[in-house]
């Protein structure tokens, strides 16, 4: 009997050893991420990320997970969450939806080997009052997987936003009254504000830079909204942006498309009393409608 128990123990140890070795040799191509969301309403929710191999088996020690949520209304600041604790291959993280609308959630798994697995998912988030009527919502998570990168097979496309710092070195205030670009049909000054603990957008008719002051356009604050894109905005490319002053003067700028905020090495651009620095815009997809645009303008150029 003792010998039999010993043999069973050896077999179990061997199986466990094989399982551990199999997991140690898993590569990023063997891994898939599945997401389940508890609550698609503005406010706090809970997100579970399951890490499995290609056979559907849970990975016991998958590494560390990082979530990044971006709205397709690009003026909003991204939301982050991360965890290095998984139970039976499942990470559970608190996550806050800060505004109703379409969100793109990117899950980044860093394995113990240093390899990374990245997948994107698309969700529609409702306000707590239910005043946003959005159809085909699966609150359990469902199949919200997005296509690779920023491109989605989307007839309406995404929006983007331009950010920068503007310093007025002159003795008088300068007012920006309009903006336009060949990259988008609509270009507007916007401000992100918090109203009753809910983030929302409002249009800004005139952007005033007081004498000797600096204005920062950034995610979650002032920004220049690009709507109805005419072409995909891809990292490494650039777009034109023209700003109109109250005096009637036009200022033309080249805006790089960047994945992450602001290129600190970028040289400032001085036009009259205004100095522009840390210019950038978010990558975004124009969707099917944008690709069918028949305009002759070149919307984005490669650097």
Image (spheres, rainbow, N blue to C red):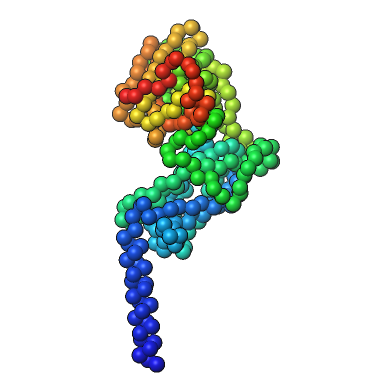
Q: Determine if residue 64 is in view.
A: no
Tell me which residue sits at (56%, 50%) in the image: 142
Which of the pair 17/172 is nearer the observer? 17
Image quadrant holding the C terminus, namely: top left
Left or right: residue 257 versus residue 46 is: left
**Is 26 drawn above or below residue 99 in the view shown?**
below
Tell me which residue sits at (44%, 15%) in the image: 297
Give the percent coordinates (x, y) of residue 291.
Answer: 47, 25
Tell me which residue sits at (50%, 21%) in the image: 293
**Is 161 drawn above or below residue 95 in the view shown?**
above
Q: Determine if residue 193 is in view.
A: yes
Tell me which residue sits at (41%, 58%) in the image: 53
Numbered label tally: 0
Give the percent coordinates (x, y) of residue 178.
Answer: 51, 15
Image quadrant holding the N terminus, namely: bottom left
Give the percent coordinates (x, y) of residue 57.
Answer: 44, 62
User: Which residue is situated farthest in the bottom direction here?
Assistant: 1
Left or right: residue 135 versus residue 62 is: right
User: Which residue is situated farthest in the top direction here?
Assistant: 248
Give the percent coordinates (x, y) of residue 244.
Answer: 48, 12
């Amino acid at each position: 009997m003792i010998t039999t128990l010993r043999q069973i123990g050896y077999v179990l140890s061997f199986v466990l050893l094989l399982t551990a070795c199999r997991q140690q040799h898993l590569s990023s191509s063997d891994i898939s991420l599945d997401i389940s969301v508890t609550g698609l309403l503005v406010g706090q929710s809970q997100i579970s990320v399951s890490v499995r191999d290609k056979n559907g088996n849970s990975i016991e020690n998958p590494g560390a997970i990082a979530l990044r949520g971006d709205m397709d209304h690009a003026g909003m600041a991204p939301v982050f969450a991360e965890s290095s604790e998984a139970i039976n291959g499942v990470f559970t993280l608190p996550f806050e939806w800060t505004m109703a609308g379409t969100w793109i959630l990117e899950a980044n798994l860093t394995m113990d080997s240093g390899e990374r697995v990245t997948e994107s998912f698309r969700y529609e988030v409702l306000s707590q009052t239910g005043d946003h009527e959005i159809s085909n919502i699966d609150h359990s998570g469902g199949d919200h997987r997005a296509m690779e990168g920023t491109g989605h097979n989307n007839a309406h496309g995404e929006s983007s936003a331009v950010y920068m710092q503007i310093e007025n070195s002159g003795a008088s205030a300068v007012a920006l009254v309009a903006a336009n670009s060949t990259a988008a049909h609509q270009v507007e000054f916007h401000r992100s504000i918090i109203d009753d603990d809910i983030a929302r957008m409002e249009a800004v008719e005139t952007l005033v830079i007081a004498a000797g002051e600096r204005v920062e356009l950034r995610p979650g604050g002032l920004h220049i909204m690009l709507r109805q894109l005419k072409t995909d905005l891809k990292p490494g490319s650039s777009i034109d942006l023209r700003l109109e002053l109250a005096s009637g003067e036009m200022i033309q700028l080249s805006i790089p498309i960047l994945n992450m905020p602001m290129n600190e090495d970028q040289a400032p651009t001085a036009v009259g009393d205004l100095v522009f620095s840390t210019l950038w815009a978010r990558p975004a997809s124009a969707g099917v409608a944008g690709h069918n645009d028949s305009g002759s303008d070149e919307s984005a150029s490669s650097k």
